[in-house]
């Protein structure tokens, strides 16, 4: 009976996650796309590295397995692309490197993406964090779009929030909600604030 209840709950969560991922695509595209490395400046359209960076971002956001539980980042140095971040599925790491290698002008891809360890404990925390953050009324809008803008990275019970929010209040609120989930060892809030309050 307990197993049946767990399976039913797991299906409900899967439906919830799927609905979150395919909900309205009206969210800010800069918040929903993979993050450029903090050292990478966003240059003008005439800058070859900026053009290449836009193509890398475009390819990464199209990856079918990219979800709220993954964090993809990249740095463009000349014709080399350095991929970093954390993913739940090994296939996403491989797909990201393959997609970027196919971009015209990319000569080398340094794939430093970390595949997170398999853990039912971490999975429970992921879904609890998802519910805690995205069920809160003022944070629900960040779950709209094909890729939610607040990413929840869980490794060995430690949570890191990545992505972007509109203001400092939302960043603080997301961190507060993330800290409210039981059995979490630590929460690191790396959310970027897009607008000055």
Image: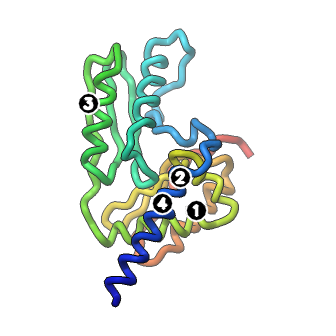
| Alpha carbons under labels 3 and 1: distance apart | 33 Å
Quarter of the view holding residue 45: top right
Between marks 2 and 4 in the image, the one whose residue lies nearer the viewer: 4
Is the residue 133 above or below the residue 23 in the image?
A: below
| Alpha carbons under labels 1 and 2: distance apart | 9 Å
**Residue 136 left/right relative to 89:** right
**Residue 158 left/right relative to 35:** left
Q: Which is more N-terminal, label 3 or label 4? A: 4
Between marks 4 and 3 in the image, the one whose residue lies nearer the viewer: 4
Q: Which is more N-terminal, label 2 or label 1? A: 1
Q: Residues within 10 Å of mark 4 (few under 14, many from 20)?
A: some
Q: Position of residue 152 (x, y in %)?
A: 45, 57
| Alpha carbons under labels 2 and 4: distance apart | 13 Å
**Residue 45 left/right relative to 9:** right
Proximity of marks 3 and 1: CB atoms separated by less than 8 Å: no
Of all residues, the one furthest to the top in this rendering is 46
Is the residue 12 above or below the residue 146 in the image?
A: below
Residue shown at 48% from the left, 19% from the top: 50
Q: Which residue is tagged 1?
A: 134
Q: Residues within 10 Å of mark 2 (few under 14, many from 20)?
A: many
Q: Which is more N-terminal, label 1 or label 4? A: 4
| Alpha carbons under labels 2 and 3: distance apart | 25 Å
Q: Which residue is tagged 4?
A: 17
Q: Position of residue 130 (x, y in %)?
A: 50, 64
Q: Residues within 10 Å of mark 3 (few under 14, many from 20)?
A: some
Proximity of marks 1 and 2: CB atoms separated by less than 8 Å: yes
Tag on residue 110?
3
């Amino acid at each position: 009976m307990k197993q049946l209840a767990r399976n039913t709950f797991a299906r409900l969560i899967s439906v919830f996650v799927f609905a979150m991922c395919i909900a309205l695509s009206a969210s800010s595209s800069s918040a929903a796309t993979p993050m450029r490395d903090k050292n990478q400046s966003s240059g003008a359209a005439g800058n070859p590295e900026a053009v290449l960076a836009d193509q890398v971002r475009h390819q990464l956001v199209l990856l079918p397995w990219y979800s709220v539980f993954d964090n993809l980042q990249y740095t463009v140095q000349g014709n080399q692309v350095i991929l970093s971040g954390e993913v739940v599925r090994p296939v996403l790491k491989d797909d990201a490197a393959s997609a970027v290698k196919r971009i015209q002008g990319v000569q080398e891809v340094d794939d430093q993406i970390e595949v997170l360890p398999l853990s039912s404990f971490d999975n429970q925390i992921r879904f609890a964090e998802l519910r805690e953050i995205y069920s809160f009324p003022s944070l629900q809008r960040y779950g709209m779009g094909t890729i939610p803008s607040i990413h929840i990275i869980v490794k060995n019970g430690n949570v890191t929030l990545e992505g972007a929010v509109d203001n400092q209040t939302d960043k603080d609120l997301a961190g507060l909600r993330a800290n409210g989930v039981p059995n979490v060892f630590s929460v690191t809030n790396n959310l970027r604030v897009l607008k000055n309050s």
